[in-house]
Amino acid sequence: MAGSDKRKQSLYFPEDMLKEIQAEAARQDRSLSWIVQKAWKIARGEIKKYPSINDLPDD
C-alpha cells in the first residue's frame, strides 16, 4: 500500500524554509511533494530518536 495512497494534505512551513524547499525543487526539477517525501525518508530514522512528549520528565 505504501506509495499508492494519494490523500491530499496541507502542510505549513516558515516562509524561509518554504523558499529553500522551492529552490531545491526547482534545482532538481522535482515537485515540492517529492522533495518533502524524500527529506522525510532520509530524516525519519534520526527523528525517531527524539523522545515523545509523553517520555519527557515532568518539571
Image: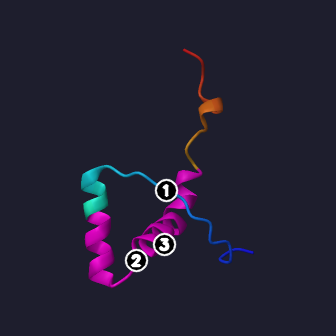
Q: Which residue is mark 3?
A: 38
Left or right: 54, with 12 as reference point:
right
Label 1 neighbourhood size at 10 Å, few (<14), some (14-19), many (20+)? few
Mark 3 or 1: in front is: 1
Mark 2 or 3: in front is: 2
User: For the point 40% across and 71% down, which residue is it?
Assistant: 32
What amino acid is labelled 3 in the image?
Lys
Q: Secondary structure at mark 2?
A: loop
Left or right: 58, with 10 as reference point:
right
Check contact, mark 1 vs mark 2: CB within 8 A. Answer: no
Give how far apart the Cα atoms at labels 3 and 1 are.
17 Å
User: For the point 59% across and 28% down, which residue is it?
Assistant: 56
Q: Nearer the viewer, residue 39 or 16?
A: 16
Mark before the other along the chain sequence, 2 or 3: 2
Q: Which residues are magenta?
A: 20-48
**In the image, farthest residue toward the bottom:** 29
| Residue 44, percent from left and from top | 55, 60
Mark before the other along the chain sequence, 3 or 1: 1
Q: Which residue is mark 2?
A: 31
Left or right: 23, with 40 as reference point:
left
Q: Is residue 27 magenta?
A: yes
Indicate the quadrant containing the C terminus: top left, top right, bottom left or bottom right.
Answer: top right
User: For the point 57% across and 60% down, which residue is it?
Assistant: 45
Q: Secondary structure at mark 1?
A: loop
Q: How many marks?
A: 3
Mark before the other along the chain sequence, 1 or 2: 1
Q: Which residue is mark 1?
A: 10
